Image: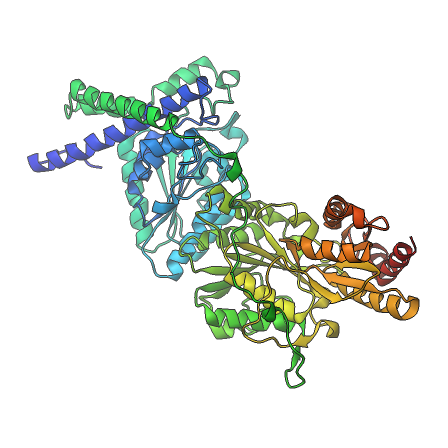
Amino acid sequence: MQLEPLKDNQLQVQKNILKQWYRLIHLGRTLDLKAATYVRMAKGWSYHSSCAGHEGIQLALGLSFRQGKDFLFPYYRDLMTSLAAGLSVEEIIENGLSKPSDVASGGRHMSNHFAKPEIRIQNVSSATGNHALHAVGVARAIKKYNGDEIAFASFGDSSVSEGYVYEAISGAAREMLPVIFVIQNNKYGISVPNRDQAANINVSENFIGFKNVKIVNVDGTNIFDSWKGMQEALEYVKNGKGPAIVHADCVRMNSHSNSDKQELYRSPEEIANAQRFDPVKRFREYLITKRLFTDEELSSIENENFKKVEDAGTKVENEPDTDPETATRFVIPPSIENISEDSDTTQPNPDIPSITLREAINETLKEEFRRNKNTFLWGQDVASKDKGGVFNITKGMLQEFGNERIFNAPIAEDFIVGTANGFCRYRDDICVVIEGAQFADYFWPAMEQLIECAHDYYRTNGKFTPNIVIRLASGGYIGGGLYHSQSLDGTFATIPGLRIVMPSFADDAVGLMRTAIRSRGVTIYIENKFLYNQFFTKTQRPSENHLTPFGKARVRKTGNDLTIVSWGTPLHFAIRVARKLETEHKIDAEVIDLRSINPLDVDSILRSVKKTGRLLVVHEHQLFGGFGGEIVSIVSEQAFQYLDAPVMRVASKNSPVPFSRILERAVLVQEDDILKAALKLAAF
């Protein structure tokens, strides 16, 4: 901001702005010191990462953010940013003391992680820099909806070492999105110096070759240079030229956090030198040197700030603590309600054509996209002329709904999931369907972002959940080998916050997809690719009102002698085995199709076991660590007295699924394996 020369009336306006700036920057420092005091007194703020040395760029960032309009993704050091952006002193202290009144998370998230979704200050995780993808996602939505908002993503220099930051900046550059990445470079990632992190000490130079990206380098300890740089970046982004990087050269005046001791890796001279660049002192000295304010005037502001912080601290300390009874709230958002029993069944009618599982998914996606214009789909190969994904699941969608709603993504699974998370933040009625990976086996790079999706509803105290359906083609029996045949359902089941469904028949493929798209939250929709075109998955095309509730199993065959619980491809083997048991061995087996792994229909399983007294669990995922172990444990704990034999499991061997058809058959669970186990169980 230019200060001189100014006319008298301009000077007064300028002084009012500078007075407010000093009030804020000093208030931020006072709060930062108060946080350190709480740590020493063991009264709260058990995680504190000081913003001292960063206040210049943080004040400029916070003041550039428009409350309730733009989207701000601060990181854990952004106390000054959050204060300037609109959080009150009380709200910051409530966060630090993990009070239930904390607007960021109600005490669920770490202290020093500031947010206020009501004014669009986003709640981010502790995984450094991962919110860069969320900022890109919401910036994509801004552009799709022709909005004039800006997305801001703030993080430290060491975050640039993360691959997903490169994915975020690369994607924003390619799509020319309205996002500003603010890199606060204090030369350290905890104790690791920049020279061990990047080839360039100025890490913005890592992105010089990125097309459409404007890079602005500023002195992050100087409020004027920081403000000027932020305005330059904003002008570029608002003109639709693409994203910008504001690289702020900062100093870290204190240790990384209260659990770090900088004296162990920084010399006394270096620590002392950092104090020379104190942004608050530099700004104060400037105001006095330029005779804009007297020492007494600034001292008066400071005294007001001290009192404000102390009064707020006293008030917040007297607030009630969090209630342990609320600890497990907001894990999974509620699904759509009032799904009747009738909608879960279809009456036989020879005049209604039958469809395969693949056709069911394709047709349902189209129907739901017609129903809600705020549904979007992206992934790899999903919008390449006449190709609709590797398995033709999205065939015809590009032609009907256009490239604005159906589009390809780069081969970057973390980017696919992370941008979906951000995109949903733009408006509540958005639903994003993504092919998380061409094959489920390639989904592993996205696991970090999947965890973020799983945490969001809980971490925000129920204020935000990404509305995403993650489609994954999973499983073996196709001769696919190590990277085209694995089953991930048992792994996903260990992550709280996710719904996991796996249809094995066409009507369930329809009903579960409809319920997933129409429900808030994250649903992993697992498609057994072996079943896509099998005749035995066919059912009549369900009605347009057909919905399948989450957490409700389906009895595929009734019986009285033993219960077989299964899902996915092995379910069809289990049904065949049950028929053989009945016709060849006079054993009446009941077969339960789980359909939904989480939530799990425990009642249906227990009801059947209490009737038959025997349980066999069959699944494709490896035996060791598979989800079948959870079912066995539940039955053993809640229905042990009804069992007439030990619970048994049949699953694939504890091995990757190999490529050779001969070796694959030896590893994956087969129909004969189920039959032998069922006969053994029945004879016990």
- Residue that appears at 39% across and 32% down: 94
Q: Quadrant of residue 561?
A: bottom right
Please state the horizontal and vertical placement of residue 328, each as a whole percent of the image: 55, 41
* Total labels drawn: 0
Is residue 457 visible to us here?
yes
From the viewer's side, name the closer residue of 371 and 102: 102
The N terminus is located in which quarter? top left
The structure's colour scheme is: rainbow
Please state the horizontal and vertical placement of residue 63, each as a whole percent of the image: 28, 39
Q: Hey, which residue is sitting farthest left in the picture? A: 8
Q: Please give left or right for residue 266 compared with residue 623 in the image.
A: left
Q: Quadrant of residue 583?
A: bottom right
Q: Please give left or right for residue 268 compared with residue 569 in the image.
A: left
From the viewer's side, name the closer residue of 296 and 291: 296
Q: Is residue 322 above or below residue 398?
A: above
Q: Is residue 331 above or below residue 597?
A: above
Is residue 668 visible to us here?
no
Q: Hey, which residue is sitting farthest top in the picture? A: 268
- Residue that appears at 38% across and 42% down: 116
Please state the horizontal and vertical placement of residue 294, each as a whole percent of the image: 15, 20
Please state the horizontal and vertical placement of residue 521, each as a whole percent of the image: 52, 54
Q: Hey, which residue is sitting farthest bottom in the picture? A: 351
- Residue that appears at 51% across and 44% down: 458
